[in-house]
Amino acid sequence: MKLIKIYQMFYTPHGLSKKYKKIDEYLLRGPHPGIADLIELKNAGVTQIYDFRHKGTRGFKFIEKYFCKELGIKYIRCPFSYLHKQYPSLRDFDTVAISVKHAGEQGGKTLFHCNSGSHRTAHMAAFYDITRGERLDDIFLGFGIAEYAKRVQEAINRHFYQQKYFNREEKAEKTLNPITYLKNKFNNKVVKGIQEAHASFIAIVTRFK
């Protein structure tokens, strides 16, 4: 008997968690799902999942990939890392957004997730929100500069500022406590990485200016 069947024998449905936010009828965004979440996502009509977590999460990737296969959900690995300056290209953004639209037109929904659903997921969700599955070049040409700029700003507000993308703050590294020093140093590396990743995203969606 498949593991998912055994799990479902003891599972009590609870509905899709509010941690998964609806972008439109085709797309949801949120943190990485557990087994119970995957079942509820399947029940909610999700047919494909994009995992944007970095390459170091191989073990977690295997678990999610396995249970997605068991449930009949397409699992797509698209890793990038703001800590290692590995950002998506315009081609990556376009490919993912077009895939969401295609899945939606086939009657399915897509989930975007990274670890917390706050940072890497924000980039991909905001890009899709701008383009709705059309190529960025075509969106820009179709809207014109003023309308396009408004569309970009609205997406940035929704996916970055309203979702607390910049919720980390730098901390003082000068301390006699070596553990606190290391924690603060790592925190500051993350803060810098978040800022640089956001700048990379802005550069891509405003490259026409």
Image: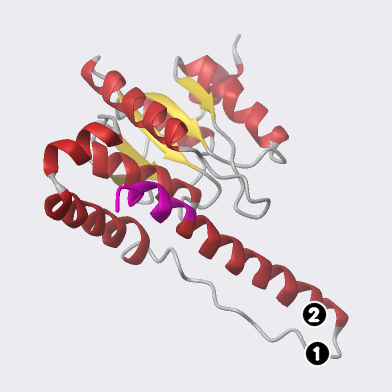
Do the residues bearing badges 2 and 1 touch, measured as CB atoms within 8 Å? yes
For residue 175, the mark is 1
In this view, 148 is above or below 135: below
Instruction: Determine if residue 51 is in view.
Output: yes
Residue situated in front as seen by the camera: 141 or 193:
141
Residue situated in front as seen by the camera: 72 or 150:
150
Q: Which residue is mark 2?
A: 181
Answer few, some or many: residues within 10 Å of disc 1's Cα (few below 14, many 20 plus, some between 14 and 19): few
Task: Determine if the magenta segment contains residue 206.
Answer: yes
User: Looking at the image, which residue is at 18% across and 37% down?
Assistant: 141
User: Looking at the image, which residue is at 69% across and 39% down?
Assistant: 57
- Distance of mark 2 from mark 1, alpha carbons? 6 Å
Q: Position of residue 76 (x, y in %)?
A: 51, 24
Residue stretch in magenta: 200-209
Residue situated in front as seen by the camera: 102 or 85:
85
In this view, 28 is above or below 6: below
What amino acid type should be assigned to the residue bearing mark 2?
A: Tyr
Q: Classify mark 1: helix, strand or loop.
A: loop
Q: How many marks?
A: 2
